[in-house]
Amino acid sequence: MQSTMSPRRRFVRAAMNAPYLDKDEEQLLAQRWRNDRDEAALHRLTHAHMRLVIAIAARFRHFGLAMSDLIQEGHVGLLEAAARFEPDRDVRFSTYATWWIRASIQDYILRNWSIVRGGTSSTQKALFFNLRRLRAKLGQGPSPLSEQELHRRIAEAIGVSESDVAMMDARLSAPDTSLNAPAIESEGSAERQDFLVSDAPLQDETVGEAIDGEKRRRRLRAALEVLTERELRIVRERRLREEGATLEALGLALGISKERVRQIESRALEKLRAALIDQEPDAGALI
């Protein structure tokens, strides 16, 4: 009679029924895989530790991802541990593999739990995976704590800022919402993104401004060629720098009075305006 058990349940049962390895056998299998690339030894070593993968994956099932996917990612971590394990060290393989299995599952959760990429630093990971546990633990006190006090204590426990805790708490409290989802408060086929307002200029305006700006810069560079060296220096120092120089400072640098600097500047601007008008009648507005 054919079994009606699902493939995943059969896999889990087979993993739980796999024989345990004693330390000497474990070391021998690890050496055969490291030194001889014996795939049969690798299979026995990993198959005997699949129950460890399942146990660790079960700790993360409340994140809403498929248990089969968590087990699969844990198996990737198990294979990574087998590739890096050094049997000469006096450490059990399960102790070493636990870190790789957990890290692989956690990375998978961070990549797939939300369409918005979360922080990948060690502190952000600790915050993501411990926030709910710490919130539940702190909520068991005799008197309820305010949200601000909860965030403060969690921030101290993990070593992050209170703003990071508040942001992560908000992310974990609600699922992602697509901007293409229908807007409930509207009639018809409007989407949520239709109600987002942007103060940025339209793309055609941005492109047009960039093209016009480049034209103005070319005209101005050509017009500057009509100035003498001293006129050009004064115009650059007074008009083309973010913080223009004073008449007095330029007079001291050039060895002339500030009134003379003002006269030269005025004459240079008139020459620039005339040069720009020669290029295009409306270009005089640049000066």
Image (tube, grey):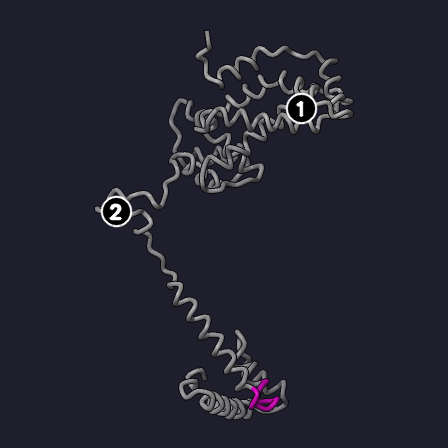
Q: Is residue 228 magenta?
A: yes
Query: Which portion, as a residue range, is magenta?
Result: 225-233
Among the 4 quarters of the image, the one containing residue 74: top right
Q: Give the residue number, with chain letter if any, for mark 1.
A: 96
Q: Give the residue number, with chain letter if any, for mark 2.
A: 189
Q: Indicate which label's residue lies in the foreground, 1 or 2.
A: 2
Q: Is residue 274 left or right of residue 27?
A: left
The residue located at (64%, 11%) in the rendering is 20
Q: What residue type is labelled 1?
A: Tyr
> Where does the image place residue 105, in percent across and percent down from the top left?
55, 29
The residue located at (48%, 41%) in the rendering is 164
> Where does the image place residue 24, in percent across and percent down from the top left?
75, 13
Callout 2: SS: loop
Looking at the rendering, in which quadrant would you find the C terminus?
A: bottom left
Q: Is residue 35 magenta?
A: no
Among the 4 quarters of the image, the one containing residue 254: bottom right
Q: Closest to the observer: 25 or 266?
A: 25
**Local crowd at mark 2 within 10 Å, few (<14), some, or many (≥20)?**
few
Q: What residue type is labelled 2?
A: Ser
Looking at this view, name the residue that lies furthest to the left.
187
Q: Closest to the observer: 174 or 30?
A: 30
